[in-house]
Image (cartoon, grey):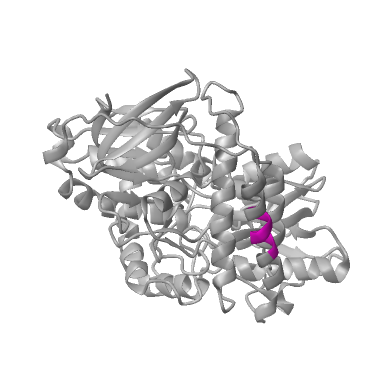
Amino acid sequence: MSKHFDIIIVGSGVAGLSTLLYLTATEQYKKGTLSIALIAKGELDQTNTDWAQGGIAAVNAVQDNFEKHIQDTMVAGGHVNNINIVKKVINAAPALMQDLIKWGIRLDKKIDGSFDLVKEGGHSEARIWHYQDTTGHALQETLVKETKLVEKLVIKTNNIVLNVVKDDNDLFHLLSFDKIAKITENLSCSQLVLATGGVGSLFEKTTNQSIATGDGIYFAQKLGAKIKNLSFIQFHPTGLYSDGSISFLISEAIRGAGAILVNNKKEPFMELYDPRGSLAPRDVVSRAILSEMQKTNSKHVYLDATQIDPVYLKTHFPNIIKNCFEIVGLDLFRDLIPVIPTQHYACGGIEVNEFGETNIPGLFAIGECAETGLHGANRLASNSLLEAIAFAKFAVPLLLDNINRLNSSIYLYTHQLPALKIIDRSEVQRIISETAGVTRTNEGLINGLHLLRQIQKNAPTMETRSDDENFIANWENNVILAIGMLLLEDAASKDKNIGVHYNLDLV
């Protein structure tokens, strides 16, 4: 028999936990007439949110206004953003910040007690609320703490969802696997919220946590939801380069504070590519870095933070200072930081409306796995945490209105463990990274898609046993392969360059 809930949320980052907190603040939950479960793939803090450095964009300064933030968002997104969504989210941002403050989030303040807002690439004004260079950790910590104060919550950590179906009674049935106890469980719900984060594990080098394998997009597509602009993958220009790998993200906020990009001759170069220099949008900066690396035959460029006031550098970027020293032995007060672009954020995903609902009634997607229309073809820095909190709040009225009370009795559903192919993750990652990176070509996309299809066709089938230690890893590998093919198909279908999609054959 299934355990039934009115609402199940899959994911424990800012999108999942914010949705949970907004729902548990309603009268229905307080009266005990609303049942909710949250499923987390790892521990509650094992999320991309926890690793976010920059901050949350919201208008607050006297010289700033909504129109400026809207315009900055549209410019970064190549003007293919949904203008109504952009306006809705940005107009809601100040009130959302007050929600976070009410929940107790730590935010940096100036000596006079006002909030210390900073500037990042693509922003015309300083509007980034932050806590040092670990805003995501501060946010995750706050949400987890608030969640623990709520009574009667059902939270399942270290659980991975293996299957989702929707029956003729409009109920969703989930097969969940407890990675610690090694047991499966059947769950059902009237409303399902996918808040599963990004697709970083499709790539060889990423700023994402290893659990970001595109699970939510995989399930949404299986259920018939529309997937849009999956190939709009944002690469962060400044991943710390260490022995050929990416070991740490250098926040864009450090460029907002005055750090500049220089080549291996220690020459500034960004002004040659864009008048905004080192503070141009991420897609522009990423392509410029690759171009400069090619020109100078180098494996990376440098970020020069030595001209930032030492006191400001120390107080605002302690985590970056610490990691650069521990990982590569650099002293940011004297040394240049070797950096290279790395996969960072999925701007596309599961298409949703202004309330976060997909074309499948009762199925919602919130956060990075969703395509809301806010980001367009390229996300403006620090709009992602904002988007997740905004849609968590936007979704609540519709989530409450559409609960299927008539079918809330418990139904029996027998899940079959998915049949899996034995997939070499590193090979799939190599193909996707080489063909769907910062720059792409028609030939590369076609060949990459062909190679992935051949892998799927020729890979041997593994015996399906959930107690096999390789089962979960290989399940993720199958998801990565499936999402990788969707990504390359979408990229190959684009007939013009815009935002983060840059096909050299379309120039």
Relative side of 276 to 20, left or right: right
Query: In the image, which residues are magenta?
Result: 447-452
Residue located at (31% from left, 47% from top): 99
Relative side of 13 to 445, left or right: left
Residue located at (73% from left, 57% from top): 340
Specify whether residue 105 is painted magenta: no
Residue 432 in the image, given as x and y percentages of width and height: 66, 56
Q: Is residue 271 above or below residue 397?
A: below
- Residue closest to the eye, 328 or 474: 474
Relative side of 189 to 301, left or right: left
Q: Quadrant of the N terminus?
A: top left
Residue 457 in the image, given as x and y percentages of width and height: 62, 49
Q: Quadrant of the C terminus?
A: bottom right
Relative side of 497 to 128, left or right: right
Asked whether residue 115 is in view, the answer is no
Residue located at (24% from left, 33% from top): 5
Asked whether residue 9 is in view, the answer is yes
Magenta: predominant secondary structure element? helix
Q: Is residue 449 above or below residue 399?
A: below
Residue 213 in the image, given as x and y percentages of width and height: 55, 44
Query: In which quadrant of the rendered view does residue 62 lie?
Result: bottom left
- Residue closest to the eye, 18 or 314: 18
| Residue at the bottom extreme of this rendering | 507
